[in-house]
Amino acid sequence: MKRAFGLFFTLLPLLAVWCQEIKVQVKDGAGPLPYANVYIKDLRKGAATDENGWAVLTNIPSGEHELQVSFTGYFPFREVITVGASNNSYEIELKPAANLDEVVVSGTLKPVNRMETPVPVEVYNPTYFKKNPTANIFEALQIVNGVRPQINCNVCNTGDVHINGLEGPYTMVLIDGMPLVSGLSTVYGLSGIPNSLIERVEVVKGPASSIYGSEAVGGLINVITKDAEFANTFSFDSFYTDWGELNLDLGYKASLGKTADVLTGVNYFNYDQPIDNNGDNFTDLTLQHRVSVFQKWNFKRPSGKAFSMAGRFFYEDRWGGEMQWTPEFRGGDEIYGESIYTRRFELIGRYELPLQEHMVLSFSYTDHDQNSVYGDTPYIANQRIGFSQLTWDRNIGAHDLLLGAALRYNFYNDNTTATGNGVLDEPDEVIIPGIFIQDEISLSDDWTWLLGGRFDYDKRHGAIYTPRTALKWAISDFDILRLNAGTGFRVVNIFTEEHASLTGAREVVITESLKPEQSWNVNLNYLKKIYTSGGHFIGLDMSAWYTRFSNLILPDYDTDPNQIIYDNLDGRAVTTGVSLNAEVALRNGLKVIAGASVMDVSQTENGETVRPVLTERYSGTWGVTYEIRPWQMTIDYTGNVYGPMRLPLLGDLDPRSPESPLYSLQNIQFTYKGFKDFELYGGVKNLLNWTPDRGNPFLIARANDPFDREVTFDNQGNAVATPNNPYALTFDPSYVFAPNQGIRAFFGLRYRLD
């Protein structure tokens, strides 16, 4: 016994050294931060700070440990600490998580602090999109200022993304900088990117063709996925609405020793309950069944140079139509339905060459198969896009040079007259090489000048040159003024981009061989950061722009109500406007991100100026977050508001409104974070229960006669008024400007394992 007591008292000092108590105080510029999370990663041990910002962790072994501190609205803190026999007290100061300090790549193809780049880039992280949980990126963008998800069909609910009033085909969508979403997938491919794998979304407004080539005319949206090394070990996020919508996101990270880190994500969405609240016997919301699997590999090379590959498989079955439609009516003329089967595979990669110079090879491949019917009209299409790009960048004195060579392979085939005589017989196949150069010149500590240009060769249209320039003046560390000017071009495929050309009874008329659209743009941008003595943050982002198009291609719904006429505009088209984004973060837990845009979009031909359909005059978005720290509860109030848009009517007798009203979609969400690693959330979407049928006698023209069996036509093929058709209409679902889905409750659960 004496020996045991002797051994105990001998080891007691050693135990005191080996197991320590550490104290951590978390504060910001104004004082302590209560209820911040303090975590020792390797020990999986954590605690929350008290009302004075202190957290105490006991039984911490001596040695090195990774300390992590996080708090909503602030940048996370990570640092390796050494726990010893003395001075185990740490003071951590967190910085407000202002989007203005994000690292971005979309503006110049190089990672750079957002305040440093001469090209204005807006950044949105997953926390922002969680304020209004959605099943896909398309819907999530509805709370981004100047960006409007546009539904193009009342029946199948496919859509695209408008930037600053420009139609969806002018927006390029990328994943990790690779142009995967284009053509067919501009319409259908914005769904199914697992939200659990998104690191941030970067938005560039204005032409970017000098870097990214065709389609980046109105702007681009770059979805940046997480680096596997820094992702959560496991994440789960699922929500359900009282309309019967179920969305599930899973993320999982695995480490293959010294070989690679692997990140896997799965998105599943299902909605199978037909609802017809507006009483037209057509589904208000398209039924969907979607599965998307994404996997990203980050290889660990001895040289430390980058090598990553990622792939995504996407399958979707969606249909909308008459309430009594079932799959056996698919493609027939008895019951009207629009049914779309989409199968899509994507591969992207980035490899840093084993050279002393910094050279990166990027590549992507997309294979898209679509089998769809619109009533009794089939649309079968295949699209394959291959893309590779080699870049070399180097600093030479005051010059930051970037040189690149790109090669793009396009294959497209369908059963329309676009590729033959209505069968899959004459595919459109083209290889487009391009080279580009960019020079970012440091004129002084305050002035930066960027010059760039791109040369592409398309055998169908010849050589295409797209220059751009940007000038940045750093007035101070918190004030940045930018002036950008550049050009863009776009090669058009009507049937892959204009859903209206495939649905309804209107005849598609292409009057000439369509030339590439070209544009030039000027954008003035001012960024301002304000840090107050009380620990508050205010960020302002103001822009004014002017864009002019030549050879513009727009659908003409007005000349003949029974036709959609496509040709190159013999004149000009102009979009101009101003926008303001504001970000406010207060110490009391209130955070506001709001924006407003006012724009004028017009086209002039033969001396007549008109406003195109579906272009809003003004818009606004907001996201208000308030954190009730004692309750560990967060409240998010998000919404948008849109001004009038001109709408496509079928003639002078059409009783529907020629313009959309001022309307707003608003949402509220409550999130409880009181459980370790879990979050419970729920709320209400479309609080005002606003739907576009308000004030209109109907949305879908001739919904009672979708095959126009009871429509009388004159000798010119125009519908005439009859007792059964007093407004001289044909079936047409293209009168759409907002979702038909009304108010709905939702409830969800998130789990995260670091």
Image: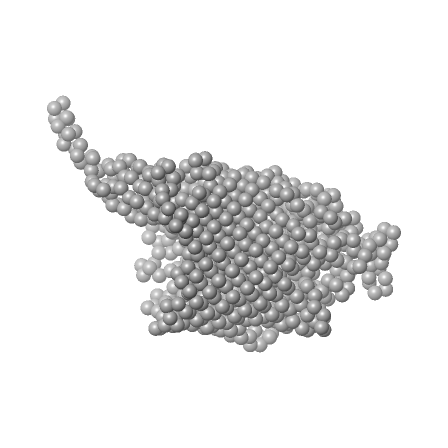
User: In this view of the protein, which residue sits in the foreground, 442 or 77?
Assistant: 442
Coloured how?
A: one colour
Q: For the N terminus, give its image quadrant.
A: top left
Up/down of 444 relative to 148, above or below: below
360 lies left or right of 271: left
Residue at image point 38% right, 64% down: 352
Q: Residue furthest bottom?
A: 462
Quick check: 490 left or right of 375?
A: left
**Residue in the picture at 36% in, 36% down:** 50
Numbered-mark total: 0
In the image, farthest residue toward the front = 533
Q: Would residue 670 be found to the left or right of residue 243 on screen?
A: left
Q: Quadrant of the C terminus?
A: top left
Residue 103 sits above or below residue 20 on the image: below
What is the x, y in percent for residue 431? 54, 70
In this view of the protein, which residue sits in the foreground, 121 or 26? Answer: 26
Residue 272 can be seen in this image: no
Q: Is residue 299 visible?
A: yes
Task: State the residue lying farthest toward the top.
Answer: 1
**Residue 486 rendering spot, x and y as whole percentages:** 53, 70
- Estimate the x, y position of residue 615 in percent, counting from the top left: 65, 59
Along the viewing direction, whichever of 256 and 172 lies nearer the viewer: 172
x 14%, y 26%: residue: 5
Picture coordinates of residue 377 (x, y %)? 72, 56
Residue at image coords 77%, 64% = 560
Of residues 278 and 660, which is closer to you in this image? Answer: 660
